[in-house]
Image (cartoon, helix red, strand yellow):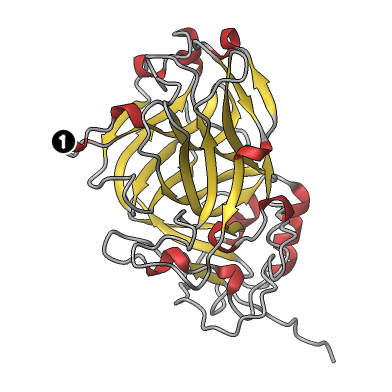
């Protein structure tokens, strides 16, 4: 007698509604930075260390990226009434830009996802942005300088007196490269305005990346939609940054005091370009129409922030083979016996799943 395979939740992927249609993705990366004691032990993310000259940087100063400019502030149980950790810092990954120059360079921060096989997906980051003028905080997907999807926050643009808090939404393209990498001169640049002060609290910033289309959100509220030939077609990776190069046309700066942007989490649900990952999915996904085979991604909104602290990888009976993190209880093998978020079940074309197109 043949034994039936043991099933787990979300074996076939994770779903969300984008522009009225249900989209599903096979893989995930989830990192709860607010409960990560030491970023150096996490293998989903790589802290960057390199220098960029002012000439290459197109700024008045170069940039010095250093791993020491990133650390996690952890306080899992004892926040004060403002949600701060005991030492007064927000809980999460701190991305630092220092006020003092090192030679002719500004000390800055960048951390990249270890996985570089991310092709199409829904990417979310909980962030509390700096209120120090003169830096650019960024959450983006990247393959190269002409295949890049950006959410960039210029702190010098914030104006508390009239509650003006813009975010620059960009598809970098060959057209932008031909314009001296000034994306503001291209059709795939939008300056959107946030309905809140991004320096006062954490909010979720989100990029949905589909073939031919990109959508940008804040707390699940759509900020912009772009349909263009500039939408990337190659697999890439995720990046979190805070930087400054003194260019008055963009980052401004350098900041007059140390500047910190804090990331509480990243959640990425995506398709992999890796044949091995695609084969892994085909083995574990026994029936995409089975109950709990495809899990709905909970949506953080302005009025419901509970999903921000909820992770598939912290639930019981989750499918494994999902992340590369070396953290305990990661990779879908968590031991916490908590209930699974409501699961979405729908009819999917199996051939579409195999091709990674839906």
Identify the image quadrant of residue 179: top left
* Residue shown at the point (73%, 64%) measured from the top left: 321
- Residue 56 placed where, x, y %? 60, 11
The answer to whether any part of residue 202 appears in the image is yes
- Residue 9, quarter of picture: bottom right
Instruction: Between residue 81 and residue 329, name the one nearer to us.
Output: 81
Most foreground residue, 256 or 25: 256
Q: Position of residue 268 (x, y in %)?
A: 55, 53
In this rendering, position of residue 114 left or right of residue 221: right
Q: Quick check: 96 above or below 320?
A: above
Q: Residue at x 46, y 42 (%)?
A: 261
Task: List the single residue furthest toward the left.
Answer: 162
- In this figure, which residue is indicated by the disc labeled 1? 161
Which is more toward the observer, 42 or 169?
42
Q: For the N terminus, which image quadrant?
A: bottom right
| 165 lies left or right of 73 | left
Residue 305: horizontal and vertical position, in percent? 35, 65
In the depicted structure, whether residue 285 falls above or below residue 53: below
């Amino acid at each position: 007698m043949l034994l039936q395979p043991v099933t787990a939740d979300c074996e076939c992927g994770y779903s969300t509604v984008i522009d009225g249609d249900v989209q599903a993705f096979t893989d995930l990366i989830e990192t709860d930075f607010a409960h990560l004691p030491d970023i150096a032990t996490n293998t989903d993310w790589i802290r960057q260390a390199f220098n960029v000259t002012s000439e290459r940087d197109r700024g008045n100063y170069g940039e010095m990226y250093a791993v020491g400019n990133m650390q996690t502030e952890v306080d899992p149980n004892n926040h004060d009434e403002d949600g701060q950790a005991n030492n007064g810092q927000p809980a999460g990954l701190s991305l630092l830009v220092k006020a003092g120059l090192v030679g002719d360079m500004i000390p800055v921060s960048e951390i990249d996802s270890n996985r570089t096989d991310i092709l199409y997906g829904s990417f979310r980051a909980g962030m509390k942005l700096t209120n120090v003028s003169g830096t650019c905080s960024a959450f983006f997907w990247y393959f190269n300088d002409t295949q890049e999807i950006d959410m960039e926050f210029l702190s010098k643009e914030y104006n508390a007196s009239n509650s003006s808090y813009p975010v620059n939404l960009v598809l970098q393209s060959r057209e932008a490269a031909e314009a001296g990498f000034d994306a503001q001169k291209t059709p795939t640049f939008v300056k959107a305005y946030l309905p809140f002060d991004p320096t006062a609290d954490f909010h979720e910033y989100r990029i949905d990346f589909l073939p031919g289309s990109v959508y940008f959100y804040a707390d699940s509220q759509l900020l912009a939609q772009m349909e263009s030939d500039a939408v990337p077609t190659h697999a890439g990776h995720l990046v979190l940054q805070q930087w400054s190069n003194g260019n008055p046309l963009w980052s401004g700066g350098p900041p007059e005091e140390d500047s910190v942007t804090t990331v509480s989490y990243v959640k990425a649900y995506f398709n992999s370009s890796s044949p091995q990952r695609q084969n892994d999915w085909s083995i574990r996904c026994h029936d995409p129409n089975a109950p709990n085979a495809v899990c709905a991604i909970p949506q953080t909104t302005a009025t419901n922030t509970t999903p921000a602290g909820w992770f598939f990888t912290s639930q019981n009976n989750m499918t494994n083979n999902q992340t590369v993190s070396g953290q305990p209880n990661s990779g879908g093998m968590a031991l916490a016996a908590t209930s699974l978020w409501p699961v979405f079940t729908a009819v999917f074309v199996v051939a579409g799943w195999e091709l990674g197109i839906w």
